[in-house]
Amino acid sequence: MTSTPLPRIAVCGISLEASTFSPALTTAAMLSPKRGREVLDAWPFWSTGGSLADRAEWIGILQARNIAGGAIPADDYAQLKAEILGGLVAAVAEAPLDGLVLDIHGAGSVVGLDDMEGDLAVAVRDVVGPDCLLSSGMDLHGNVSRTLAETVDLLTTYRTAPHVDWQETKERAAANLVARLALPAGRRRPAKAWVPVPILLPGEMTSTRQEPATSLYARVPEIEALDGILDAGIWIGYPWADEPRNCAVVMVVGDDAELAMAEAGDLARELWERREDFGFVAPTGSFAEVLAAATASPLRPYFISDSGDNPTAGGAGDVTWTLAELLASEDLAASGKRAIYASIPDSMGALAAAEAGVGADVRLTLGARVDDRPAPPVEVAGEVVAVVPSEDNLEVVVRTPTVDVVLTRRRRPYHLEADFTRLGLDPRSADIVVVKIGYLEPELFDMAADWMLALTPGGVDQDLVRLGHQRVQRPMFPLDDVSGVDPVAGAVLFPGDTA
């Protein structure tokens, strides 16, 4: 008796969240492409001993990924895309592929091209053929264009923001694919209900920590559990790119096409009806207002989110506006309090401070090398108190009279307590901690005695009207008058094998 051969499943993708309002660019090298076995080693569930390792013949092609940033230059995207397609051609030449995991974020952008993920999915489909099943697990801040929804057979997304379920989602995308490939040919493709909803909101207003997102996302597993439904998702979308696809999307996938369409429509209407209920995850204000609250507060550590240049949302990371305001604050100096600022990337400045060494007094001109629109480079004078090199970065702490400035060779987020303590900084005992972030990530959220979100300028400005979208579909909430809009007018059912 011969055993059934394992399905052949390729893994590839380009994963990036990219602001088209930022002058920054994300090159192919910055995306740190992994190839072959490295692609598989990035996720534990299909690595040796993982839950899915023995369920398929996994074939790593190329996976490129970076923290959020600016758009990818056209030539760099073409290079990565060509390598992915070439790898798939070689894999198909050995034997047909049964499935493919397209590892994408959903908010990638390429200079001169709308809908990077849709373009890549179509190109991949052309190589692997119509019988290969495509699956993707995406970020809920990604976008699902009609092209992407039609081309990819199985789509799922995160259900939490902050994204504590990111790995679970990637595994679910792979597990759903394996499960569908176990069905007979002709019964594998589920129906897909796709409902674009004309809402464009930042993640800082749609966190699942608070209503209405808490209860809206709680509906997702309830729908998934229905007989005839495989998966459901709400993509709240990415607001800092100006492309026609940018908006919220509800999708329900399953073998019961009628039920999938009904549930997707109901969830989309509920999302629409509660659109006015979305609010920021913390008290907000101008930086001056927020800093005044922090200096007056008896609580510490008091966290301030410098939201407009958040590198994990797509900001260039080197906007100096907030740092300049902080260093110049007479109120901070008069309060007797000190602040930590994390961070300002400046390669030349970091190298100069490191060369001067711990204990040296330095005077550096920093930042605004990439994004100088809100403010010019800022002068920072103080003592070097830490120099911490790493494999891919260099971090320096410069102590001024009122602020410990974290300076880096390359931009990076500061989300963990260890990000500070390894630099000799104790965020728990600090008076004020200013981080380039939107909503606080879990460790910082738990650490903060209090916090506020500063509405600062940058490529991921929370004031969407101030950014000035020109190319998204209109009318769009909250940019326009949306009275009379039918939120499910654009709904489409892709019937799959249930036709």
Image (tube, grey):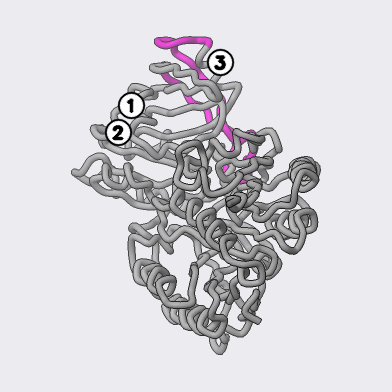
Q: Is residue 353 above or below residue 437?
A: above
Query: What's the mark number on residue 421?
Result: 1
Q: Quadrant of the C terminus?
A: bottom right
Q: Residue at x 34, y 47 (%)?
A: 442
Q: Amino acid at mark 3?
A: Ala
Nearer the camera: disc 3 or disc 2: 2
Q: Badge 2, how many Cα within 10 Å: few under 14, some, many 20+?
A: many
Give the left or right position of residue 294, taking residue 62 as reference.
Answer: left
Residue 79: x, y in percent?
Answer: 78, 40
Left or right of 154: which side holds 114? right
Magenta segment: does it hold 275? no
373 drawn magenta: yes
Secondary-structure class at tag 3: helix
Front tag of 1 and 2: 1
- The residue drawn where x is 36% and y is 59% is 281
On the image, which quarter does residue 26 sit in? Answer: top right
> Which residue, given by chain and number where applicable, does mark 2 sit on?
427
User: In the rendered image of this protein, does residue 190 appear above or below residue 312?
Assistant: below
Say which amino acid is labelled 2: Pro
The x, y position of residue 59, in whole percent, is: 64, 42
Q: Quadrant of residue 184?
A: bottom right
Residue where numbered disc 3 is placed: 352
Residue lying furthest left: 298
Check disc 1 and report its element: helix, strand or loop: helix
Bounds of the magenta segment: 355-382
CA–CA distance between discs 3 and 2?
26 Å
Q: Position of residue 3 (x, y in %)?
A: 58, 51
Report the residue at 25% width, 35% height from top: 428
Q: Which of 140 and 231 lies nearest the eye of the viewer? A: 231
